[in-house]
Amino acid sequence: MRTRIRGALAVLCVLALTASTIAQDKPADAAQPRPYRLTLPPTIYAVPGVEMSLYFDNTVLVAPDQKVSFEVDCPLGSVDARRWKLTAEANQVGTVPLKLRAKDDSGKVVESATAQVTVVSAKAGQGKDIALLVVGDSLTHASAYPNEIARLLSLPDNPKWQMLGTHKPAGVAPGVAHEGYGGWTWAAFNKRFDPQPYDPAKRICSPFVFGVGEKPEPKLDVARYISERAGGRAPDFITVMLGINDCFSFNPDDAAQLDQRIDGVFAEAEILIAEFRKAVPQAQIGVCLTTPGNARDAAFYANYKDRYTRWGWRRIQHRLVEKQIQHFRGRESDRIFIVPTELNLDVVDGYPENNGVHPNAAGYQQIGGTVYAWLKSRL
């Protein structure tokens, strides 16, 4: 028998009437704007003993004068004022449906979205030996969520693991390495080049780009990266968390232009993914959904004054996530997967008071837990 869990949250924000999907079952249509935009990724992953959440704020975009409450229908987990949460137990391994309904202030269901919750055994991958390549921007450079992935992978009953990467900034835990650089985009990893000898500390040249010829011309070459910069070991898993720097300066008030420019970002993403696939065809690639920013307007003002606002980024980020889900879903046969990093991040307690897009230790821990749960699902 299914258990119905209900929770309510008043959400006050501003609406940009652009396209979306309902339960990702139909493609977005910019000609049919909606006053409620509810979006869920296809799968939420969980591992026994590791808390996983679906924060309601992170799923919806609504008009300033509208309040929305939520009803969750799922046989697992519980609901509090701001989220559905699950700390799974060993006997809950398996897949169950989750349905999220948004209701207006009259109690009418205005949108619904569905996902599946996949609980993976804490012993998944036990005895294996895996290599992981983590790619990203300043959130990865901070090294907090890669450290959390490493901590979780070091718990009993996990595989032996190695993190590949040329970048080991201050703060990395033992064994942690990655390719995460502040301000970087998909295009930066494809194109950034310096003809001088490669120095990862300078962060001028993409680790995946090499000079070719007497007058060096840049070439994206992941196979050469593996042989020359990753110790010759190919990754079994690759995660990429990019999108903030790609899209932060876009204009959220022009829906058509926003979609066009996000599509341009995806074109760059496909170049890098194709190169990963060419070099390591068996590797499983997790595309991390771009995380929402701090819930505090003051945090954005502290960083950007009036140049960029919380509401502007919220609209861009929500649309980006909608399109990421549309673009990358259904590609499991190509070993490409969606990692729902935007759901399990507390935009209040997971952020400091004075930073718009960089979480605090608790927020980074949530991101790491989400990536870990996805990894376990593939093991």
Image (cartoon, grey):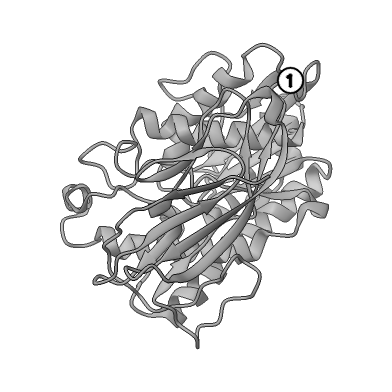
The image quadrant that residue 245 belongs to is bottom left
Residue at (41% x, 31% y) in the render: 142
- Farthest residue, direction front: 1
From the viewer's perspective, is 368 left or right of 269?
A: left
Q: Is residue 254 above or below residue 69?
A: below
Percent position (x, y) of residue 222? Answer: 71, 43
Q: Name the residue under label 1.
A: 123
Residue 320, visible in the rendered structure: yes
Comparing 78 with 55, the one in front is 78
Q: Can residue 201 be seen in this view?
A: no
Residue at image position (63%, 20%) is 153
Q: Quadrant of residue 271?
A: bottom right
Quarter assignment of residue 21: bottom right
Q: Where is residue 373 in the image (x, y as percent from the top left)?
A: 62, 33
Up/down of 272 relative to 91, above or below: below
Q: Measuring 72% from the left and 42% from the top, which residue is drawn there?
A: 95
Residue 341 shown left or right of residue 156 in the figure: left
Amino acid type at mark 1: Lys
Q: Nearer the viewer, residue 201 or 248?
A: 248
What kind of element bears circle 1? loop
Q: Residue 173: where, in percent of width, then height?
A: 49, 16
Q: In which quarter of the image is the N terminus?
A: top right
**Residue at 77% in and 31% down:** 379
Q: What x and y, as percent, mark residue 207?
A: 59, 39
Q: How crowded is mark 1: few (under 14 residues within 10 Å), some or many (20 or more)?
A: some
Left or right: residue 25 versus residue 34 is right
Q: Which of 32/259 is in front?
A: 32
